[in-house]
């Protein structure tokens, strides 16, 4: 088991569809003991229910916009766990109107809020976790989306926040590498979660990925979970500051007609014109 004897904190479970829950399940399967957080009473019951299905898990409150709650979280976690081997950050938020409106209409407050919850929170959480990370090192994992690199309609302010989060990954990785604390991100393809459903036109995005991605399908949250285990485990010990795409290959696809319209049977015999002539010395490539 890849995470046997390890202890980790997972932030961002809202329900069983959450990517955080998929990562938690994969980590638990690999032997990790986990702590979870919830932000408000509305999700507390759900998080406790899910956490209750895992052995010796711990559930604690934390709204990442509140420094006092962040400090208290790690104080309590210190008492429960003593040591933290990994931290999984699956938190993002933007006002719905900042996703529905044209990007140019983004408000100052909407911009601040999205950056605070979706990007700065990783800095604040990792700083507060430092005393619990052992001398042997730790692994930090966060979740991002390709809207950080490309202007995706209606992803708007969240794309800017993810660009910021990806820079945070690199700066934290550089800062903390000498302590063997690795910081990486997974850029996931679209997954049908509570947060994703807040993005206008999300079902169209799912459809677009099925047509355009090399694997010609959408990803499953469990695939993010398994990739997450890799980044949390010593199998990735030489990797930090990295963004790993778990998106059925979408990010490498170029423009063109939808893939499934171009699918043709692979010819077993080359058409006559395409048959290569016998090689002469002129065709030899050397060096
Ligand atoms: P999700 O299940 O809705 O999870 C989002 C979590 O963020 C929720 O648990 C939410 O808690 C939490 N959160 C928001 N504001 C918070 C705050 N102030 N303090 C503490 N927690 C707060 O959605 P998800 O899709 O799994 O999202 C997880 C991560 O994956 C996000 O970073 C998202 O951007 C990223 N991601 C998602 C997709 C996708 O297609 N789903 C693709 C790429 C990347 P409450 O429910 O209590 O507000």
Image (cartoon, rainbow, N blue to C red):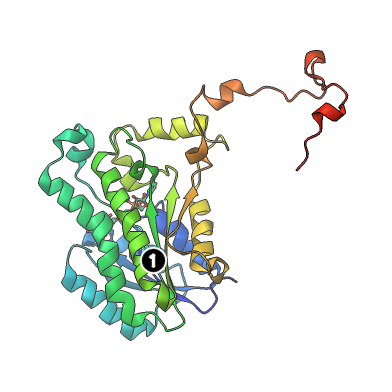
Q: Secondary structure at mark 1?
A: helix
Nearer to the camera, 37 or 162: 162
Q: Is residue 5 visible from the viewing direction of this image?
A: yes
Direction from residue 270 to residue 12 in the image, left or right: left
Residue 224 in the image: state x and y as whole percent: 49, 53
Q: Residue 31 location, x and y as percent? A: 54, 73
Position in image of residue 151 (x %, y %): 32, 36
Please report the residue visible at 77 percent of the width from the left and 36 percent of the height from the top. 285
Residue in front for this viewpoint, 196 or 17: 196
Residue beneath label 1, please? 173
Q: Is residue 196 left or right of residue 103?
A: right
Q: Nearer the viewer, residue 70 or 18?
A: 70
The answer to whether 259 is drawn above or below residue 238 in the figure is above
Residue for point 48% across, 77% down: 6
Q: Quadrant of the C terminus?
A: top right
Question: Badge 1 local density, few (<14 within 10 Å), some, or many (20+)?
Answer: many
Using residue 94 as the reference point, say whether residue 83 is left or right of it.
Answer: right
Can residue 12 be seen? no
Quadrant position of the N terminus in the picture: bottom right
- Relative to 135, does residue 176 appear above or below in the rendering? above
């Amino acid at each position: 088991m890849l995470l046997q004897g390890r202890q980790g904190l997972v932030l961002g479970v809202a329900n069983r569809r959450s990517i955080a829950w998929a990562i938690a399940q994969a980590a638990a399967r690999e032997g990790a003991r986990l702590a979870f957080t919830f932000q408000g009473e509305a999700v507390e019951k759900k998080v406790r229910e899910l956490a209750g299905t895992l052995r010796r898990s711990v559930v604690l409150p934390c709204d990442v916009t509140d420094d006092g709650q962040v400090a208290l979280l790690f104080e309590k976690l210190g008492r429960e766990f003593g040591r933290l081997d990994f931290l999984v950050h699956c938190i993002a938020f933007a006002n719905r109107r900042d996703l529905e409106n044209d990007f140019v209409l983004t408000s100052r407050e909407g911009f601040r809020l999205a950056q605070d919850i979706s990007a700065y929170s990783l800095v604040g959480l990792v700083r507060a976790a430092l005393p619990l990370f052992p001398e042997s090192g730790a692994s930090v994992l966060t979740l991002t989306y390709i809207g950080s690199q490309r202007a995706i309609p209606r992803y708007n302010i969240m794309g800017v926040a993810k660009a910021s989060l990806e820079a945070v990954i690199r700066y934290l990785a550089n800062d903390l590498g000498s302590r063997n604390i690795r910081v990486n991100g997974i850029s996931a393809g679209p997954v049908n979660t509570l947060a994703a459903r807040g993005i206008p036109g999300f079902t169209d995005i799912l459809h677009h990925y099925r047509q355009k991605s090399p694997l010609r399908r959408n990803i499953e949250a469990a695939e993010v979970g398994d990739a997450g285990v890799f980044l949390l485990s010593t199998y990735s010990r030489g990797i930090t500051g990295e963004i790993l795409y778990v998106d059925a290959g979408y990010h490498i696809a170029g423009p063109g007609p939808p893939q499934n319209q171009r699918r043709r049977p692979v010819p077993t015999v080359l058409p006559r014109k395409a048959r290569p002539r016998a090689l002469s010395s002129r065709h030899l490539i050397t060096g």
